[in-house]
Amino acid sequence: MTKQNTSASAPEAGHFITLEGGEGAGKSTLAKALAARLGALGLTVELTREPGGSPKAERIRNALLAGQIKPYGAFAEALMFSAARIDHVDRRIKPALARGAWVICDRFIDSTRVYQGALGAIGPEKLAALETVAIAGLKPELTLILDLAPEIGLARAASRRLPGEAVDRFEGETLVFHRRLRQAFLDIAAAEPGRCVVLDASRSPEQLAEQAWQALASRLRLPQIAPA
């Protein structure tokens, strides 16, 4: 009896990229631009976001951004973010990676580290414990941190809101909060240079996309085909 080789049919493992940064930095626009360039190489791309990304996680997102959890404190928010992340990782991210997709996620663990950790004053031990449970060993291969002066980012966020649309839970924080947030992201990048790349988000969307593509191409293995 001839032994069948099943390994040849197994898909190549996917890649996990996260985008981080303050409000209005252009993460969603950049995610779409990167997805288009990867797609032009014939690669499968899964675009997702946090909080959210799966049906249960999207319901938690609505509660968080509406400020419904804020009165209970930063730790309660961190618990809710973790609950959403567990569902997102299990139902969306890990299955996509197993299929060989390139997963691009708008926010992930670094946002929790910054918003609820550095700014919410939750101790690193508690956050690390929540993170261990939520991601079960999953870490981004590459994190692009979009750096932008908060004054510019908040103005961008305000300009995209529809008439009568409420400011969300985090956009409504003070300018001091957003300045501290910016520095906290830069501190993470300085602490983990092997994973994180800081991009100048004050540039045009096209220039930012080119910066990001160069970072991606230098850090991760791409097919040897010129991008579209």
Image: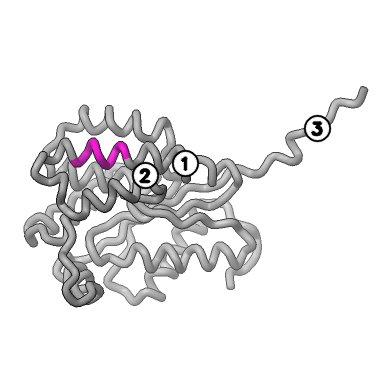
Classify 10 Å Cα crowding around label 1: few (below 14), some (14-19), many (20 and above). some
The CA span between labels 2 and 1 is 10 Å
Indicate whether 28 appears above or below 177.
Answer: below
- Whether residue 202 sits left or right of residue 73 in the image: it is right
The amino acid type of the residue labelled 1 equals Arg
Residue tagged 1: 91
The amino acid type of the residue labelled 3 equals Asn
Question: Of callouts 2 and 1, which one flags the residue occurring earlier in the amino acid sequence?
Answer: 2
Location of residue 178 in the rendering, given as x and y in whole percent from the top left corner: 14, 58
Residue at disc 2, secondary structure: helix
- Circle 2/circle 1 CB separation < 8 Å: yes
Residue 118, quarter of picture: top left
Magenta span contains residue 125 = no
Residue tagged 2: 56
- Whether residue 41 sits left or right of residue 45 in the image: it is right
Residue at disc 3, secondary structure: loop
Indicate whether 122 appears above or below 145.
Answer: above
Location of residue 212 in the rendering, given as x and y in whole percent from the top left corner: 42, 63
Quadrant the C terminus occupies? bottom right
The CA span between labels 3 and 2 is 39 Å
Q: Magenta segment, which residues?
A: 77-83
Q: Nearer the viewer, residue 77 or 4?
A: 77
Magenta span contains residue 78 = yes
Residue tagged 3: 5
Question: Of callouts 3 and 2, which one flags the residue occurring earlier in the amino acid sequence?
Answer: 3
Location of residue 110 in the rendering, given as x and y in whole percent from the top left corner: 29, 45
Location of residue 4 in the rendering, given as x and y in whole percent from the top left corner: 83, 30
- Whether residue 49 sits left or right of residue 35 in the image: it is left
- Residue at horizontal 66 percent and vertical 43 percent from the top: 11
The amino acid type of the residue labelled 2 equals Lys
Which of labels 3 and 2 is toward the front?
2
